[in-house]
Image (tube, coloured by chain):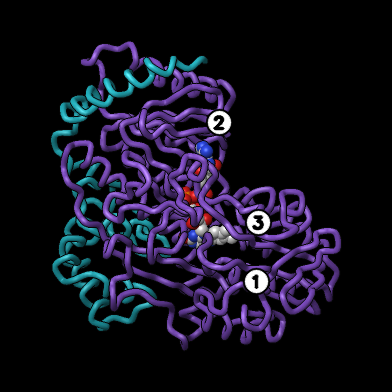
Chain colours: A cyan, B purple
């Protein structure tokens, strides 16, 4: 394949930039919080949890079948050293009660669906 | 493996993508185009998320399969095989991500286009740069590409891993394995010490009179007190660590005689593993996205390169402040970056992210230890959140170490599924 000439390349790119911005605005999914792209509106920190806690349980628990309340309680107990930890206390202490609640709600809704 | 027809088909698809927008009318532009360079833990994660957000994603990755560094130290220890480390892009292609199975050669950040190895060019609205690391073959006297065939680095998993394992298997009982560890920053800060541990595990089982000598360019390392205590407990005197101030910094290697030369003396190895200095993958350097350190400075909210607008850097190639260069970090950054880029393309401001890292190391098959951290933007970097993070408890029963070893394996299974499907 040959490359387009320099001048037309630049022109093409700038036209494209405008075109695609319009395209992006027109084409974004209507309800980003539901379904496949729930990560777009995930609260800070939430998606990282799924690096260890997948849709299926392993030696590490899946969060998919837990309620928001369960997750929030677990995070609070790890944060306040009220639950015997291996690692989760060190992570839970990085989030406020309010942040943890938002994470718990998001995970309860989406952890099973590879959001 | 991706079959030949599939590869051709995919390549043709990518090439078509590169030229058709030029002649299409404006209304045919379905959505913004994002090009992702590098299909590792960072790039593959980000590509999948961006695709799910409805964007047109092209993943540029020359290798048909990805061989994972995490758990490759277990391959050296004879606990796993390289095939258990190998993943393909088939799931990503099935999902509808366009794969350009070829190297990205150049980036024109002003024109917003990437030139591929065959001369084709891919225009983008946003570029995700995730090329991982390159070995600095100019960083240690005597250590060039040819030397790495004698003294493997095995810091990119694949043939180098197999070579080092074969050398360990061929070594006589009573031999010395020398590992040289680089100064910070480098890929996987606890990696050299996990490697020493699992090599010692292999030697203890098969060649108990042998030794592992770590020559280190630093005076401190990740999970140091946990590693040191576990080494004594599990391997007695088998592992010796020499830090910078005790003369551990290797200044030159002689591959012919397998000799490591430090400021204080010479160490002859029966098996030598040089973990050399590193920098961001070559494309980041040649395109000017890396700075004079060899790594890429980024905005901690958007991961956008400080050196050029429209280009976002994630994974090992980025300067991520307190975040270590790990697969866990790369995955977390891939998701946060996809969120930021999706919102930016909609004209919305991305929220300030919080990121997590956790890394397990195996000191033995049933003995795991971990480090964790939480990070947020502060003073232009991703900084540790105070009060969070740290390493496993100094004193813990064997059951806790065994649990962490099983969590390590669980993590690997979950994250590779998250990244590669
Ligand atoms: C021995 C060892 C053990 C480790 N253990 C762990 C662990 O237990 N846990 C953990 O979290 N991390 C671990 N790591 C670290 C982990 O491997 C890296 O942090 C991670 O791979 C970084 O991901 P990345 O996507 O940035 O780079 P990579 O995984 O290296 O991916 C980069 C990709 O970009 C491609 N690429 C490069 N240049 C181009 C180009 N010009 N065009 C197209 N494609 C290109 C490459 O082919 C590659 O596929 C370990 C590392 C080592 C060496």
**3 or 1: tag closer to the N-terminus:** 3
Per the rendering, the mark at residue A101 is: none
Dot 3 lies on which element?
loop
Query: Residue tagged by mark 1?
Result: B196
Q: Quadrant of residue B8?
A: top right
- Between the residue at mark 3 and the residue at mark 1, the CA separation in whole angstroms equals 13 Å
Give the residue drawn at x 48%, y 24%: B10
Dot 2 lies on which element?
loop
From the top left corner, tell me how far across and down residue B388 is, in percent: 31, 75
Please tell me if label 2 and label 1 are on a single chain.
yes
Query: Residue tagged by mark 2?
Result: B2
Please rate how many residues cluster around mark 1, counting C-alpha atoms within 10 Å: few if below 14, some from 14 to 19, many from 20.
Answer: many
Give the residue drawn at x 33%, y 50%: B303
From the top left corner, tell me how far across and down residue B267 is, in percent: 79, 74
The answer to whether A5 appears left or right of B73 in the picture is: left
Query: Residue tagged by mark 3?
Result: B154
Please tell me if label 3 and label 1 are on a single chain.
yes
**Disc 3 + disc 1, Cβ < 8 Å:** no
- Between the residue at mark 2 and the residue at mark 3, the CA separation in whole angstroms equals 25 Å
Residue B107 visible here: yes
- Between the residue at mark 2 and the residue at mark 1, the CA separation in whole angstroms equals 35 Å
The residue nearer to you, when weighing B73 against B240, is: B240
Give the residue drawn at x 73%, y 70%: B178
Give the residue drawn at x 48%, y 86%: B397
- On what subunit does the disc labeled 2 rest? B
Mark 3 Cβ and ligand 1 under 8 Å apart: yes
């Amino acid at each position: 394949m040959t490359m387009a000439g320099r001048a037309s390349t630049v022109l093409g790119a700038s036209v494209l930039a405008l075109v695609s911005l319009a395209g992006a605005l027109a084409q974004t999914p209507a309800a980003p919080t539901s379904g496949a792209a729930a990560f777009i509106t995930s609260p800070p920190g939430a998606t990282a949890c799924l690096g260890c806690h997948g849709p299926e349980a392993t030696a590490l628990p899946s969060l998919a079948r837990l309620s928001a309340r369960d997750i929030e309680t677990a995070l609070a107990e790890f944060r306040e050293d009220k639950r015997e930890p291996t690692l989760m206390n060190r992570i839970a202490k990085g989030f406020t009660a309010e942040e943890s609640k938002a994470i718990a709600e998001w995970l309860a809704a989406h952890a099973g669906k590879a959001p | 493996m991706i079959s030949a027809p599939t590869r051709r088909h995919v390549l043709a698809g990518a090439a078509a993508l590169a030229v058709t927008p030029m002649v299409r009318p404006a209304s045919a532009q379905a959505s913004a185009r994002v090009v992702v360079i590098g299909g590792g833990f960072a790039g593959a994660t980000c590509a999948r998320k961006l695709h799910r957000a409805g964007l047109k994603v092209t993943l540029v990755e020359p290798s048909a399969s990805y061989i994972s560094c995490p758990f490759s130290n277990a391959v050296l220890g004879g606990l796993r095989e390289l095939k258990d480390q190998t993943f393909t892009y088939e799931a990503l292609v099935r999902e509808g991500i366009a794969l350009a199975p070829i190297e990205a050669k150049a980036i024109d950040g002003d024109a917003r286009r990437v030139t591929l190895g065959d001369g084709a060019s891919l225009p983008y609205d946003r570029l995700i740069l995730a090329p991982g690391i390159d070995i600095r073959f100019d960083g240690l006297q005597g250590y060039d590409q040819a030397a790495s065939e004698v003294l493997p680095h095995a810091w990119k998993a694949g043939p180098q891993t197999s070579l080092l394992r074969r050398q360990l298997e061929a070594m006589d009982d009573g031999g010395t394995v020398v590992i040289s560890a680089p100064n910070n920053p480098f890929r996987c800060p606890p990696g050299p010490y996990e490697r020493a541990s699992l090599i010692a595990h292999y030697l203890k089982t098969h060649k108990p009179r042998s030794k592992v000598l770590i020559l280190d360019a630093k005076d401190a390392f990740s999970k140091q007190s946990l590693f040191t205590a576990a080494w004594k407990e599990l391997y007695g005197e088998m592992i010796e660590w020499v830090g910078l101030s005790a003369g551990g910094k290797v200044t030159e290697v002689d591959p012919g005689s397998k000799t490591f030369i430090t400021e204080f003396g010479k160490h002859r190895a029966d098996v030598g593993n040089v973990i050399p200095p590193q920098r961001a993958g070559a494309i980041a350097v040649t395109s000017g996205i890396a700075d004079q350190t060899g790594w890429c400075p980024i905005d901690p909210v958007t991961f956008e390169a400080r050196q050029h607008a429209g280009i976002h850097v994630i994974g090992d190639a980025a300067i991520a402040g307190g975040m270590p260069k790990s697969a866990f970090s790369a995955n977390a950054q891939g998701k946060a970056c996809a969120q930021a880029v999706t919102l930016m393309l909609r004209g919305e401001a991305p929220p300030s992210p919080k990121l997590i890292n956790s890394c397990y190391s195996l000191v033995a098959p049933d003995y795991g230890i971990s480090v964790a951290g939480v990070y947020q933007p502060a003073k232009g970097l991703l900084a540790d959140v105070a009060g969070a993070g740290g390493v496993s408890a100094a004193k813990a029963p064997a059951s806790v170490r065994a649990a962490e070893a099983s969590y390590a394996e669980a993590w690997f299974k979950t994250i590779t599924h998250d990244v590669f499907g």
